[in-house]
Image (cartoon, rainbow, N blue to C red):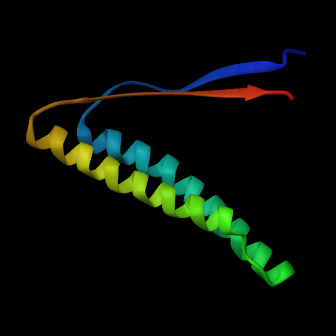
Amino acid sequence: METLSKYKLIEGDFEPNDAAKILFALVNSKINYHSMDSFSNHIRFGTSFISQEKRIKELSEVNVVIKKLADYAMSNNKKMRVTSVINIELI
């Protein structure tokens, strides 16, 4: 079995609204994951982890940047090229 796998998740040129939708879906999925995990830890252990809260904040800031980029691209009649590769490594 290979110890490193690579998969293209996104590759293409998109209208700003479409690019933003795709990127928001990815980022919001990660935010939801960390939020649910944090909630679960709070219920099970009565505590939350600062690292999860920090990651949620970082991802929320990514959403702000995506919005600004999409707005800029739209107002300047530009498309957005989005490429996303996921690497999975067995360690």
On screen, residue 45 above or below 81: below
Residue 23 in percent (x, y) is at 42, 44
Residue 70 as seen in the image, left or right of residue 2: left
Which residue shows up at 67% across the image and 20% down it?
6
Q: Quadrant of residue 15?
A: top left
Q: Is residue 2 left or right of residue 8?
A: right
The picture places residue 27, in percent across and down from the top left corner, at 50, 51
Side (left or right) of 13 relative to 84: left
Q: Nearer the viewer, residue 67 or 57?
A: 57
Residue lying farthest top?
2
Tally of marks: 0
Using the image, determine if residue 37 lies above or below residue 12: below
Q: Residue at x 77, y 80 (%)?
A: 47
Most foreground residue, 45 or 32: 45
Note whether 5 is above or below 67 in the view shown: above
Q: Quadrant of the C terminus?
A: top right
Residue 21 vs residue 77: left or right? right
Residue occupying image coordinates x 49% and y 55%:
59
Q: Position of residue 74 (x, y in %)?
A: 15, 41
Q: Nearest the camera: 90 or 79?
A: 90
Q: Nearer the viewer, residue 29 or 88?
A: 88
